[in-house]
Amino acid sequence: MAGTSDINDRGPGMRRRLYAPLLWTLAFLAVAIGILVAGGLFVRSIVDRSFHNAELIRAARLHAADMLREQLDEETGVRGYAAVRVPALLAAYYGGRANLPAVFARVRDDLQRLGVTGALPRLDDAVATNRRWLTEVAFPIILSRGRHPWLELRGKDLVDRFRADARAIDDALARREQLLDAQAQQAIFEIGGFAVAAVIAVVIAGASFTVAQYRLAARLELEQAARETEKRIADVLQTAFSERLFPQLASARFSATYVPATEQAKIGGDWYDALQLTGDRVLLAIGDVTGHGIDAVVAMNRARQLLISAALLDPTPGHVLERVNLDLVRAKSPLVTAVCAVLDTRDRELQYAIAGHPPPILAEPGEAPRLLDFGSLPLGVMAQTPYPTNRTTIARGATVVLYTDGLIEYSHDTAEGEVLLIAAVAATLDGSAIDLAPAIRRRIFRERRVADDVAILTVSLIESHQPEIAQ
């Protein structure tokens, strides 16, 4: 106690000199934490803006696809009428003609809002081409009574021109999407540099302080703040990606679940999608990006957007994966495993292609669940990798289960994991569970620990027209 008494006796000057290193350290620490917090908020704003832009671009590309579809509906109606002269066949033509002006307006608004003004001339050309098609082809065919092959040939030329304009608009939107992704990644990288600099400054400030426990406490506080910041950002990303709305089909019931890893360091890039195409056809997709952390989640968003865009152009699963693979190889993206499938709920035909991902499970009434055929290499390995499209007809009441590897690799024994998963699917289907995906997840991890992200997507064909229940 004598030391304390001496310090007090020597007055405030001595205390200031003794406490000055600690005050400087605390000041450095406060500045560093401020930089980290500001950086985290800035990164979060970039991520939110990136999500917003991605949704705007996705909507714009869907509108561009609607534009082409309406033109093709017009052409189909006129061609059918020209062939058999049945007025009812003109319903598609009149529908497309009524919808196209609004679709053109939406596409124009999208291009202006996203700053893709370079594509506006192609939109103007598409509008003019449609007008020429109406006046030079559609009206003469409808008003005449005979066949005019030269008019139909002229119509094909104009529709091909319209198709080229729509493709050019979609390509411009895709380039805009890539630019926005690159800008977001660059901003995150720069903020990461500021965060690293702040940590270094704190370490240096702590080293200048003579009391080791203060330095250690400051370092632990900074490390904890960095972990919490990364976890918060990853949670925002994963929450946004995992919220899905399923197609509303009376002939199918969808269920899905997502379980994040129990360890913060293992937050990964798992995702799933179920999108309605035309009629009763549904696009099913599930995938996983190699690696963990924010980079994996960002790469997952890019791969998911590429897959959706490719499916809008050509929904054949093998072609979708080949196009996404080429883009990922060019971008030097992390490897991605994925399953892309198209299910026709009316004809009960399942088409699928696999890129290094665990194969889907097919469970048909009266038969044991089974694994479907395995696929090709993961996406992003080699540019010219082929991805064959498998086709199979499934029974009424069948269920297709798609999942990520976290569901079968928790014990590092994939074969054992597949056996347990098949048993869990069989037991769940034999029970009374309506939401199949959560029920399968609970049965697998009832006595096991989730070591990696897990995503499950199921679709079941139903014969009754009761409302479907989505999870």
Image: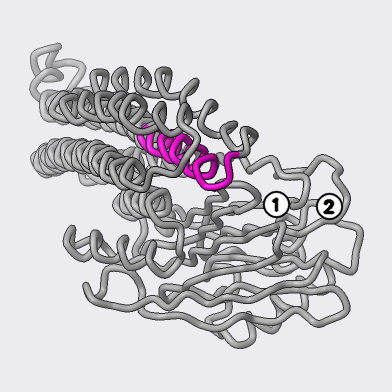
Residue toward you, 442 or 197: 442
Q: Please state if 405 lies on the left or on the right of 200 as rendered.
A: right
Task: Please tell me the numbered disc located at residue 434.
Answer: 2
Q: How is the image coloured?
A: one colour
Image location (x, y in percent) of residue 163: 29, 43
Q: Position of residue 71 (x, y in %)?
A: 40, 35
The quarter holding residue 316 reads: bottom left
Picture quadrant where residue 359 is located: bottom right
Above or below 303: residue 248: above
Q: Where does residue 259 sit, x and y in percent of width and height?
A: 59, 54
On whether residue 72 falls in the magenta region, the answer is yes
Q: Which amino acid type is shown beneath numbered disc 1?
A: Ser
Residue found 47% across the figure and 57% down from its top: 270
x 14%, y 12%: residue: 11
Q: Is residue 160 left or right of residue 236?
A: left
Tag 1: Cα neighbours inside 10 Å, few (<14), some, or many (≥20)?
A: many
The residue singled out by tag 1 in the image is 255
Residue 386 appears in the figure = yes
Question: Could you tell me if the residues under marks 1 and 2 are in contact, i.e. CB atoms within 8 Å?
Answer: yes
The count of marks equals 2
Task: Where is residue 65? Give x, y as percent.
Answer: 39, 39
Q: Amino acid at mark 2?
A: Ile
Residue in the picture at 69% in, 75% down: 421
- The answer to whether residue 184 is left or right of residue 335 is left
Q: Secondary structure at mark 2?
A: loop
Q: Nearer the viewer, residue 69 or 420?
A: 69
* Residue extending furthest toward the front: 146
Q: Which mark is residue 203?
A: none
Tell me which segment is drawn in magenta.
64-85
Q: Secondary structure at mark 1?
A: strand
